[in-house]
Amino acid sequence: MNPAYNPSPSPPPSLRGTKQSLHPIMKYHLFNIKDKFQLLFLFLLMIFQRGGCVYILTNKLHTVLYVGVTSDIIGRIYDHKNKIYPNSFTAKYNCNKLVYYFFYPHIEEAIAIEKAIKGGNRKYKQQLVNSLNPEWKDLYDELISA
């Protein structure tokens, strides 16, 4: 028998270390989006290369900016929007609008970029958002329907 073949594989490991399976919204959208292959490719790329996304959230009036990094962008933004962690910074300041995200093939690279962005001033973060999203629209819906 081929040692790589396992007829009853165990569930995939958690993407963020806190969940035992894919986020429910990810399961739903893998089978109900227009371009399944694009999302599946991004998902597989993130899992197998251990890549990550740097993202910026803001509140309704754009007065607060939050910079984060994750290997599960859809699940993490879902958590922010639904205030899964009610005592978190994003929950306290109502940062639930995704205005910027960028994928990096290696999580270490994403973490380094996140630190650099966090170390920058507000004007730098605004320029970063303006470069990819000048209207400051919420990118979450586009992300899950990609």
Image: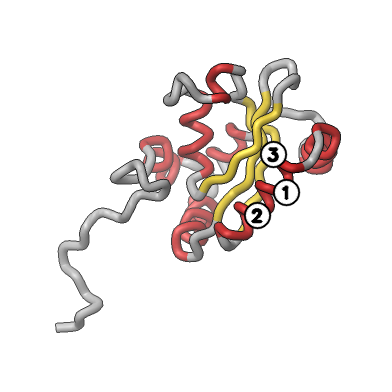
What residue sits right under mark 1 in the picture? 116
Would residue 33 appear left or right of 143 to someone viewing this image? left
**Foreground label between 3 and 2:** 2
Mark closest to the chain's N terminus, 1 or 3: 3
- The disc label shown at residue 100, or none: 3
Q: CA distance from mark 1 to mark 3?
A: 15 Å
Q: Residue at x 54, y 49 (%)?
A: 35
Amino acid type, mark 1: Ala
Q: Is residue 95 above or below residue 21?
A: above
Q: Residues within 10 Å of mark 1 (few under 14, many from 20)?
A: few
145 with respect to 121 (left or right): left
Say which amino acid is labelled 3. Tyr
- Of residues 44 and 90, the one nearer the viewer is 90
Residue reaching furthest to the front? 119
The residue labelled by disc 2 is 112
User: Which amino acid type is marked by label 2?
Assistant: Ala
Q: Position of residue 58 (x, y in %)?
A: 68, 26
